[in-house]
Amino acid sequence: MMIRVLGMMSGTSLDGVDAAMIETDGIRIGGFGRSGYRAYSDNEAAALHAALGRWPGEAGVKEAAEISVLSHAALAGDFPEAELIGYHGQTLAHDPQGRGTHQAGDGAALARMSDRPVIWDFRSEDVRQGGEGAPLAPFFHWACAEWAIAQGHLPVEPVAFLNLGGVGNITWADPSVPAPEAPGACIAFDTGPANAPINDLMRNRLHRERDEDGRLASSGRVDHDILAEFLRHPYFERPPPKSLDRNQFSGLSQAVSHLTDADAAATLVAALARSVAAGLRWLPAPPAVLLVCGGGRHNTAIMEALRAQLTTRVQPVESAGLDGDMLEAQAFGWLAARVVKGLPTSGPMTTGVPAPVCGGRISHSR
Ligand SMILES: Nc1ncnc2c1ncn2[C@@H]1O[C@H](COP(=O)(O)OP(=O)(O)OP(=O)(O)O)[C@@H](O)[C@H]1O
Ligand SMILES: CC(=O)N[C@H]1[C@@H]2OC[C@@H](O2)[C@@H](O)[C@@H]1O[C@H](C)C(=O)O
């Protein structure tokens, strides 16, 4: 039975909350619906930035969780048609081999406030069972490929999805395999830093939220010594599955600190593109197309750098009939429906968990 689910995602860019309706039985995509966005206010963004890297019980975390719940509840009120909510929460820290993974928020409070059942805490169980806890969108990317083939937007061939949020992640999906958790269907991992260091640069130096359309980066020159040093990071030699914390590459931000604004932005964009290029060697076969989703595809300098670095065709995910601004929100709606059904949300080739696992907790509205 298809249900109408609201997926809600606030990612590592710390810009705000995306919300999108999806109709699904947890296996197939029945259709996509309305979407919405609520930007974090300056005060909210500052409080979340201050809480980055912190764990439950530490200073500022309670405030961050409250900001997450209140902003999601306000947005959920615009979607009375949703029967179920998938709520990711705000990632503050991610250390799967150590302290775990921390998404600030409270699904039980959101369920009471929105008067709908809420699926949340999607990552902890995967980490508990030995997985990376991220990325989690890959099974949904596989379902999107299947949907796009049915709509006549894609050929029946392996494709890749590149999500450029705060951090980048890639999924190689083979839609000829019958289910996303089946061996050979998906391979996924985080590629490297994406918008987070660019946003931090803009915020710290120019008091702006982002490099609009990549205009600053397009006017700068890449520092090839810094780039070469960045590419020596052992992360790129490590085979997948693998995932990143938002600030794991903070050395890169320090390395560009003496450059001009434009050269620093250009070097960060080049680092993003080269880390994607470095990641492609881990894919089992070249994808027919690299479908770019997430806010980074609006940055012209990023898209041009990707096209210059890669021999694979690079297209915004809209070329497959999908909404690249809402794909991750839709993913957490689709995953919520899977949790209700007890279906796996991750597996050995997406997070490295030993066997497919169904993560997520359910909180009822009363
Ligand atoms: N017009 C634009 N020009 C330049 N950059 C843009 C533009 N639009 C969006 N972005 C970048 O995309 C970011 C938002 O991307 P997105 O919503 O995919 O991130 P996210 O929700 O944090 O994702 P994730 O969970 O995958 O980290 C912005 O913070 C900004 O850096
Ligand atoms: C721990 C965490 O929140 N990771 C995010 C982050 O943002 C992008 C990348 O790093 C990815 O691993 C993940 O989000 C996407 C939506 C995912 O789980 O697929």
Image (cartoon, rainbow, N blue to C red):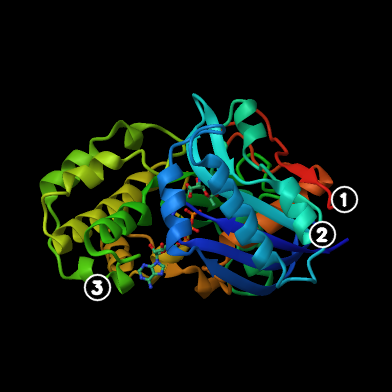
Q: Is residue 73 left or right of residue 54?
A: right
The residue that mark 3 highlights is 215
Q: Which of the two labelled residues, at mark 2 and mark 3, occupies the earlier sequence position?
A: 2
Q: Give the label, 2 or 3, closer to the camera.
A: 2
Do residues under tags 2 and 1 come within 8 Å of each other at their CB atoms?
yes
Other-residue count near label 2 (Cα within 10 Å), few / some / many at <14 / 14–19 / ≥20: some
Residue sitting at x 66%, y 43%:
122
The residue that mark 1 highlights is 366
Q: Is residue 54 left or right of residue 178?
A: left
Amino acid type, residue under disc 1 in the picture: Arg
Amino acid type, residue under disc 2 in the picture: Asp
Amino acid type, residue under disc 3 in the picture: Arg
User: From the viewer's perspective, is residue 71 above or below residue 223?
Assistant: below
Give percent across and percent down for residue 332.
65, 54
Q: Secondary structure at mark 1?
A: loop
Give percent across and percent down for residue 187.
53, 44
The residue that mark 2 highlights is 115
Q: Tell me which image quadrant ligand 1 sits in.
A: bottom left
